[in-house]
């Protein structure tokens, strides 16, 4: 009954450090998404993967890279973290592009000092 | 561009009070509209949806009606409970089938 699993739940980085946020879903969904959530700004789409083997930029892709490793897994990498990337990051999945029912993970709280 | 605007929170109510959270959207055409809810420490989950004008979405006592005349999709509940305390997000589907979220409205219900 896992759904969408994100790791880690919390992370503190220093400016310039790199890290990868992991996401996996067990619902055989085709599409996966990475969002960031900032106070007063709601959720903004960073990258998405409509299907295995494809990735596309969302609204705020700068400073991030993604990998759709297989159908289950979609990772988000920060190559050189900046304080502006302090945020809560959510991974989500859906049955397919155009499906409005997204299933979200519980989030990763990232602080960049 | 296309957007979703929600009323700012927090909204603080007593238990059994009536709830309205306003949401308006801009878009070409008539996009599908949604309300998502985020309980403390969790990810978002779909609460209700409406796919065409005059549709009413409902779930768990919450309702929202798709009003094309006013480009609105306000969330209502007749009698809130403490367990309804959460952040509520209005959202719409964009032309490339991705969700655009509003900024969220925090609801706090006091016993």
Image: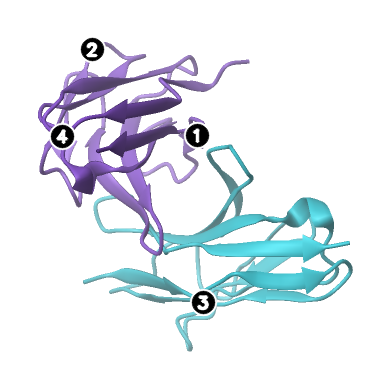
Chain colours: A purple, B cyan
Quadrant where the C terminus of chain B is found in the figure: bottom right
Confirm whether circles 1 and 2 share one chain: yes
Residue nearer the viewer, A20 or A60: A20
> Does A51 sit above or below residue B34?
above
- Residue B33 appears in view: no
Label 2 and label 3: CA atoms lie apart by 39 Å
Which one is in front in this view, the residue at disc 1 or the one at disc 3? 3
Residue bearing mark 1: A103
User: Which of the 4 image quarters holds residue A88?
Assistant: top left
Query: Which residue: 50% across, 42% down?
Result: A101
Q: Do residues under tags 3 and 4 come within 8 Å of each other at their CB atoms?
A: no
Query: Which residue: 63% across, 44% down?
Result: B40
Q: Residues within 10 Å of mark 1 (few under 14, many from 20)?
A: many
Q: Do residues under tags 2 and 3 come within 8 Å of each other at their CB atoms?
A: no
Label 3 and label 4: CA atoms lie apart by 35 Å
Residue A61 in the image: state x and y as whole percent.
15, 43
> Does B52 sit above or below residue A7?
below
Confirm whether circles 3 and 4 share one chain: no
Which one is in front in this view, the residue at disc 4 or the one at disc 2? 4
Residue bearing mark 4: A15
Q: Do residues under tags 1 and 4 come within 8 Å of each other at their CB atoms?
A: no
Does B22 sit left or right of A113 as displayed?
A: right
Query: Which residue: 48% across, 87% down?
Result: B70
- Residue A57 appears in view: yes
Q: Secondary structure at mark 2?
A: loop
Name the chain letter of the residue that bears numbered label 3.
Answer: B
> Does A100 sit above or below residue A26?
below
Q: Which mark is residue B7?
A: 3
Residue B38 in the image: state x and y as whole percent.
58, 47
Confirm whether circles 1 and 4 share one chain: yes
């Amino acid at each position: 009954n896992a759904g969408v699993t994100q790791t880690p739940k919390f992370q503190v980085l220093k400016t310039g450090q790199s890290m990868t946020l992991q996401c996996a879903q067990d619902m055989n969904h085709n599409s996966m998404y990475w969002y960031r959530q900032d106070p007063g700004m709601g959720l903004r789409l960073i990258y998405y993967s409509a299907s295995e083997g494809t990735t596309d930029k969302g609204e705020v892709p700068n400073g991030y890279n993604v990998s759709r490793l297989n159908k289950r897994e979609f990772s988000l990498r920060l190559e050189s973290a900046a304080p502006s990337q302090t945020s809560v990051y959510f991974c989500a999945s859906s049955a397919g592009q155009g499906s409005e029912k997204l299933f979200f993970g519980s989030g990763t709280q990232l602080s960049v000092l | 561009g296309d957007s979703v605007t929600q009323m700012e929170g927090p909204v603080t109510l007593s238990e059994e009070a009536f709830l309205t959270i306003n949401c308006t959207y801009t878009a070409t055409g008539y996009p599908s509209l949604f309300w998502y809810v985020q309980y403390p420490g969790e990810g978002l989950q779909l609460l209700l949806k409406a796919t065409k004008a005059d549709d009413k979405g409902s779930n768990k006592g919450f309702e929202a009606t798709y009003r094309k005349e006013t480009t609105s999709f306000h969330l209502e509940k007749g009698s809130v409970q403490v367990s309804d305390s959460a952040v509520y997000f209005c959202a719409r589907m964009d032309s490339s089938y991705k969700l655009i979220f509003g900024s969220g409205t925090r609801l706090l219900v006091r016993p």
